[in-house]
Image (cartoon, helix red, strand yellow):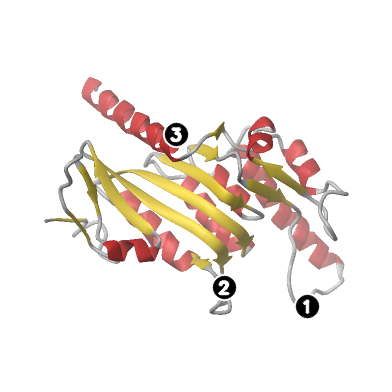
Amino acid sequence: MTEKHNDDLQNTDKYECEDKDDNTEVSQASDFETGSITVSKDGHFIHCLTIIGQIEGHYILPSQNKTTKYEHVIPQLVAIEESKEIEGLLIILNTVGGDVEAGLAIAELLSTMKTPTASLVLGGGHSIGVPLAVSCQRSFIVPSATMTVHPVRMNGLVLGIPQTLSYFEKMQDRIVNFVASNSKITDEKFRELMLKTGELVMDVGTVLDGESAVECGLIDELGGLRNALDFIDSQIDGGNDASLNN
């Protein structure tokens, strides 16, 4: 048994790995329940983090909701970035969206990491899941997945005053600018998708399947798990080669 991350992941569960016949190490089964796992192959440690269900922000959602809590994800990202052993990060997304500021906070952290990152959209990457999908160095989506692009919405009591509309516009601008800066889509095209009518029932916006998301430049590549892992491996190997040359 080998124990990892004693110094780098003090606030997260310790990982214990066992040697496998195929030279692959996997953390204990209890780690699967947290939605994250660290695996090692050919000497490279890659962390997998899942963002599923609804992004939970400042308010606790009902217990029957499947949620991803941003106060759990953010410390993990900091620990991964500071870890001396973890060399790559894979984000797997299947989310309906959720709290805009919480989702954008996670996306901003991902976009500023030096650790090689890749995102994979499975099932759905809707609403605030779109910035999360494009925040990594390379984004992938399977053909059967979909992504819903729509304007910012707010639940509960909303005051019908100019200040409220101004807040919505600023929040929407933050999302548009982030997506355009971290993908190949232009801000004009993204706004066009957000405000499209006739496609969503009782709402405006656009639903994109995997191929359409790649065609419009929102997602980098159509692919699955193997493609995402191959990209991370190539980034790790490229970084190691550069270090040797220096």
* Spot occupied by residue 67 in the image (x, y as percentages of width and height): 53, 68
Q: Amino acid at mark 1?
A: Leu
* Residue that appears at 61% across and 38% down: 181
Dot 3 lies on which element?
helix
Say which quarter of the image contains residue 241.
top left
Note whether 243 is above or below 170 in the view shown. Answer: above
In the shown orientation, is residue 72 left or right of residue 150?
A: left
* Spot occupied by residue 201 in the image (x, y as percentages of width and height): 83, 58
Q: Amino acid at mark 2?
A: Asn
* Spot occupied by residue 49 in the image (x, y as percentages of width and height): 41, 54
* Spot occupied by residue 212 in the image (x, y as percentages of width and height): 69, 36
User: Mark 1 or mark 2, which is nearer the start of the sequence?
Assistant: 2
Note whether 51 is above or below 87 in the view shown. Answer: below
The front one of 57 and 25 is 25
Q: Quadrant of the N terminus?
A: bottom left
Dot 1 lies on which element?
loop
Crowding around mark 3 (Cα neighbors within 10 Å: few <14, some 14 to 19, many 20+) is some
Disc 2 + disc 1, Cβ < 8 Å: no
Give the residue number, with chain letter if any, for mark 2.
65
Q: Amino acid at mark 3?
A: Asn
